[in-house]
């Protein structure tokens, strides 16, 4: 039977793809397929499924890379077989990772970039959790050495990305989250001070808030914690979640002080696969100096040959993205990153200006590089009496393929819905103009033909499709 099936396959190789029997029959969905099929047909079946996915370039919800140079595609294809964890077999890949860590330490002003320590990760979430774990270990060691209770660690933060909620739950740390307010939308020094005590392992300051795109003020929060220490002796470290901001401000606002220039900043995470311009699958976690990463978190393994240190949550992971990250650093340098990111802020300014002029919207983040990431966020003006809401507008924008998420803000501001666009590498000014034309056309269409029943957040598919801040 098996032999017959094989010869049937061989006989059918010349069939037109879409006239073939395989593509004319229902394909297996949830049961493990019983038979083998020819690669070209299997590929066509898979691709046919994917044509219904959205167009990544029109997805203004995601923070992640959706455009890469052909050289990067080529590198990815040639490096697919390299495993990042296997540093003995791929010592040059390990060296490139090491160089990236040193370059980032330099970019983020570590006191001694040769002595700083860091790692690539699968994304910011993993790097954030490693930063949180290191803080928990440092706090516990110090408390145990002083004979104090070590059972109730807490982490102070504002409206963080879901990775910090995961950190709290997975690693048993109380999350003391300050609510968002409509005055600043970001974590304030006062909110931090109200929540810190002797069990605070760290304060997480988000440098490029997921909800609005705004930077939280790391320098002001650091100064408030300096003052707290002077008054009470409490020495609370800062972890900066610079998932997106870490690859923006160093190039577009180098005077903004948010990184290791502040002695209280002990660790930083950033997403290589967001504003770092690498393809999806790489993040970075860095510590100010070696002493800030407790040695108990670093494992030495010998079973791949040699002796390799590892401090990741995952073991095996692809190395190709790390190699692509090194390529981007080498290819663009400070000058290139400044130009790429500068262009995105220019597009953000154009979008902000035009959206503000449309009438019914009030800007929350206007895409100014001093205030936040290359994004624009807005709400409906409180006085705008529109017969539609932002979910209706998001839904209409989908008819042209644009994904412009509308979502409600977190605790205490959940009645306030906002809409956000993220500008990413590959989003040209021409695309920005096309987007704005479609936005105006859809606003006009909604005014002329108001929906009989407005959409609600869940109906707009916000959390699953349009990138509610929980998603990347
Ligand atoms: C501020 C912030 N932190 C962490 C993350 C999670 O990053 P990743 O998707 O790289 O795991 C995101 C994702 O959007 C984010 O905006």
Image (cartoon, rainbow, N blue to C red):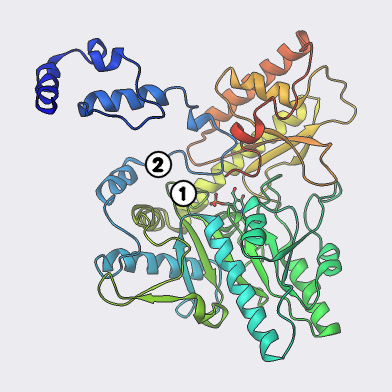
Q: Are marks 2 and 1 in contact (CB under 8 Å)?
A: yes
Q: Is residue 122 above or below residue 434?
A: below
Q: Secondary structure at mark 1?
A: loop
Which residue in the structure is indicated by mark 1? 277
Residue 417's quadrant in the figure?
Answer: top right
Q: Residue 459's spot in the image, x, y percent?
A: 69, 25
Q: Quadrant of the N terminus?
A: top left
Give the residue drawn at x 56%, y 39%: 62
Q: Residue 95's spot in the image, x, y percent?
A: 32, 69
Total residue callouts? 2
Q: Residue 370's spot in the image, x, y percent?
A: 69, 53
Q: Residue 8's spot in the image, x, y percent?
A: 12, 19
- Crowding around mark 1 (Cα neighbors within 10 Å: few <14, some 14 to 19, many 20+) is many
Q: Secondary structure at mark 2?
A: loop
Give the residue drawn at x 50%, y 54%: 123
Is 107 displayed left or right of 143 in the figure? Answer: left
Residue 96's quadrant in the figure?
Answer: bottom left
Circle number at residue 333: none
Which residue in the structure is indicated by mark 2? 68
Which residue is farthest right? 383
Give the residue drawn at x 63%, y 48%: 373
- Crowding around mark 2 (Cα neighbors within 10 Å: few <14, some 14 to 19, many 20+) is some
Is 64 displayed left or right of 278 in the figure? Answer: right
Mark pair 2, 1: CA separation:
8 Å
Q: Is residue 190 above or below residue 59?
A: below
């Amino acid at each position: 039977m098996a032999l017959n099936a094989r010869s049937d396959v061989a006989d059918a190789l010349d069939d037109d793809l879409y006239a073939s029997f395989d593509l004319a029959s229902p394909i297996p969905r949830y049961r493990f397929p019983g038979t083998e099929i020819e690669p070209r047909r299997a590929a066509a079946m898979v691709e046919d499924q994917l044509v219904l996915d959205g167009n990544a370039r029109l997805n203004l919800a995601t923070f992640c890379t959706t455009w890469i140079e052909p050289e990067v595609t080529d590198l990815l294809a040639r490096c697919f077989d390299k495993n990042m964890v296997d540093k003995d077999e791929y010592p040059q890949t390990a060296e490139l990772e090491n160089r990236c860590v040193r370059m980032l330490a330099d970019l983020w002003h570590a006191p001694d970039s040769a002595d700083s320590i860091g790692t690539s990760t699968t994304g910011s979430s993993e790097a954030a959790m490693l930063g949180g774990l290191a803080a928990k270990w440092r706090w516990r060691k110090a408390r145990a050495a002083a004979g104090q209770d070590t059972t109730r660690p807490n982490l102070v933060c504002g409206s963080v990305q879901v990775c910090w909620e995961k950190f709290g739950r997975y690693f048993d740390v109380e999350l003391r989250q300050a609510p968002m307010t409509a005055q600043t939308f970001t974590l304030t020094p006062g909110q931090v001070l109200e929540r810190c005590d002797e069990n605070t392992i760290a304060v997480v300051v988000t440098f490029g808030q997921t909800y609005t795109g705004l930077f939280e003020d790391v320098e002001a929060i650091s100064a408030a914690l300096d003052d707290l220490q002077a008054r009470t002796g409490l020495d609370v470290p800062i972890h900066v979640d610079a998932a997106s901001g870490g690859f923006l401000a160093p190039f577009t606002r180098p005077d903004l002080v948010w990184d290791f220039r502040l002695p209280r900043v002990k660790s930083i995470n950033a997403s290589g696969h967001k504003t770092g311009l690498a393809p999806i699958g790489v993040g970075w976690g860095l510590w100010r100096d070696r002493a800030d990463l407790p040695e108990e978190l670093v494992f030495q393994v010998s079973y791949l040959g040699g002796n390799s240190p590892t401090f990741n949550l995952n073991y095996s992971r692809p190395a190709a993205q790390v190699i692509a990250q090194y390529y981007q650093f080498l290819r663009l340098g400070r000058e290139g990153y400044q130009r790429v990111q500068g262009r995105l802020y220019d597009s953000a300014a154009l979008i902000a200006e035009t959206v503000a002029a449309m009438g019914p919207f009030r800007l929350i983040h206007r895409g100014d590089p001093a205030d936040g990431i290359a994004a624009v966020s807005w709400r409906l003006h409180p006085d705008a009496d529109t017969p539609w809401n932002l979910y209706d507008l998001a839904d209409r924008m989908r008819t042209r393929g644009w994904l412009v998420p509308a979502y409600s803000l977190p605790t205490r501001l959940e009645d306030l819905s906002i809409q956000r666009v993220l500008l990413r590498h590959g989003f040209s000014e021409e695309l920005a103009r096309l987007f704005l034309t479609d936005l105006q056309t859809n606003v006009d269409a909604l005014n002329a033909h108001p929906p009989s029943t407005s959409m609600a957040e869940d109906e707009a598919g916000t959390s699953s499709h349009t990138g509610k801040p929980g998603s990347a």
